[in-house]
Amino acid sequence: MTGMHNPPHPGLLFEDYLGEVSLSEAARRLGVTRATLSRIRHGHSGVTADMAVRLGLLLGTSAELWLGMQTAYDLWNEKQKPRPEVLPLAG
């Protein structure tokens, strides 16, 4: 994932995996509310380790796929923010 520009939030790719299954049905199978899943779907909430495991089970993917996408998204966004200069320990 190095050199990637503005990676997508994993929620944006979620619908591709759902196919014809409704968000309500997916939420029911995941054991979460439709509102919770909708927040992830629209990029308003992140994919936690717990949700990554659930998504992996639901969709036949790896939990690492979802957590990796979330981490790439979070890191890219964090790197866009200004921060104070940090001096490395090793000189």
Image (cartoon, helix red, strand yellow):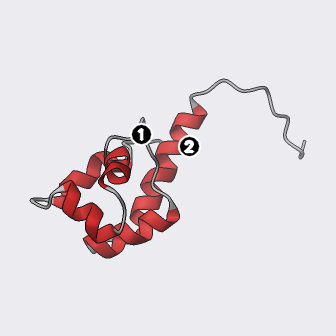
* Rendered image: mark on residue 44: 1
* Rendered image: mark on residue 75: 2
Task: From the top left corner, tell me how far across and down residue 81 is, in percent.
Answer: 61, 27
- Tell me the mark number nearer the camera, choosing from 1 and 2: 1
Give the left or right position of residue 90, taking residue 45 as reference: right
Query: Mark 2, residues whose alpha carbon is within 10 Å: few (<14), some, or many (≥20)?
Result: few
In the displayed structure, would residue 49 be above or below residue 46? below
Q: Amino acid at mark 1?
A: His
Query: Mark 1, residues whose alpha carbon is within 10 Å: few (<14), some, or many (≥20)?
Result: few
Helix, strand, or loop for circle 1? loop
Q: Amino acid at mark 2?
A: Leu
Give the left or right position of residue 91, taking residue 16 as reference: right
Task: From the top left corner, tell me how far across and down residue 63 is, in percent.
Answer: 42, 69
Give the left or right position of residue 86, taking residue 47 as reference: right
In the displayed structure, would residue 85 be above or below residue 18? above
Task: From the top left corner, tell me how far across and down residue 26 is, in percent.
Answer: 24, 63
Instruction: Depth check: give the residue in front, 86 or 67.
Output: 67
Q: Residue at x 33, y 53 (%)?
A: 37
Helix, strand, or loop for circle 2? helix
Q: Mark 2 or mark 1, which is nearer the start of the sequence?
A: 1
Q: How many marks?
A: 2
Q: Residue at x 72, y 27 (%)?
A: 83
Q: Quadrant of residue 57?
A: bottom left
Rounded to the nearest angstrom, the CA distance separating label 1 from label 2 is: 16 Å
Q: Quadrant of residue 64?
A: bottom left
Residue 1 visible to an observer of this rendering: no
Instruction: Depth check: give the residue in front, 85 or 62.
Output: 62
Q: Residue farthest to the left?
A: 20
Give the left or right position of residue 80, taking residue 1 as reference: right
